[in-house]
Amino acid sequence: MNSEGTLRIVATFEAKCRQCGCVFPHPSLGNFAYGETILASTNGKVFAIASAFEEFPQRISNEVADSSQFWRVLAALADPVHGSNLSPELRCSGCGSIHLEYWEGRRIGEASVQMATFTAASRLTEDALSRLIRQVCDESK
Ligand SMILES: [Zn+2]
């Protein structure tokens, strides 16, 4: 299944950065998004929704021994959004810090968020993919 370009409307909530103090909106799927999460770019400016139930993520879930690493691995394998790599952590859109004072605060509005795609990673050989998955898991230890 290729969901490239698919956009979803997602509610946005207020977050505040502990590092630089800026207040910014971030999209959230809330508590009812079973099997889905929002990935954020490492500069905190763009987002993508990842679903555990699509073909490629399903393949990855079989390869990731430690399921707590699943979203981290998926984020690392996702195609960059507007040139930015993705991570499972919400980051400040001002300074990129992961140290937030709060998030999912006041509801602000909504934003369209694209579905994460895995075009590049899905073209890797099984070996290369396994190596990459191991590397991501090791890095986060
Ligand atoms: Zn900040």
Image (tube, helix red, strand yellow):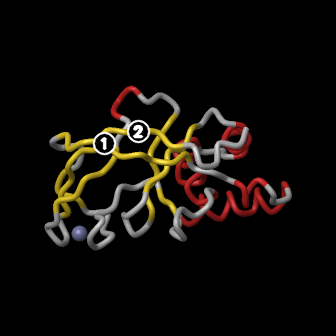
Can you tell which quarter of the image residue 91 is in? bottom left
* CB under 8 Å between discs 1 and 2: yes
Figure quadrant of the N terminus: top right
Amino acid residing under circle 1: Glu
Determine whether the residue tagged by mark 1 lies in a helix, strand or loop: strand
Amino acid residing under circle 2: Ile
Front in this rendered view, residue 37 or 82: 82
Counting from the top left corner in percent of width and height, residue 10 is at 37, 39
Q: CA distance from mark 1 to mark 2?
A: 6 Å
Q: Is mark 2 within 8 Å of ligand 1?
A: no
- Residue bearing mark 1: 110
Is 120 on the left-hand or right-hand side of 116? right
**Eyeballing the image, is 75 above or below 68?**
below
Counting from the top left corner in percent of width and height, residue 26 is at 30, 51
Counting from the top left corner in percent of width and height, residue 66 is at 59, 45
Determine whether the residue tagged by mark 2 lies in a helix, strand or loop: strand
Q: Residue at x 71, y 43 (%)?
A: 2
Front in this rendered view, residue 92 or 100: 92
Can you tell which quarter of the image residue 53 is in? top right
Q: Residue at x 51, y 43 (%)?
A: 7
- Residue bearing mark 2: 9
Q: Earlier in the sequence, mark 1 or mark 2?
A: 2
Is 134 on the left-hand or right-hand side of 47? right
> Callout 1: few (<14), some (14-19), or many (20+) C-alpha neighbours within 10 Å?
some
Q: Residue at x 33, y 33 (%)?
A: 30
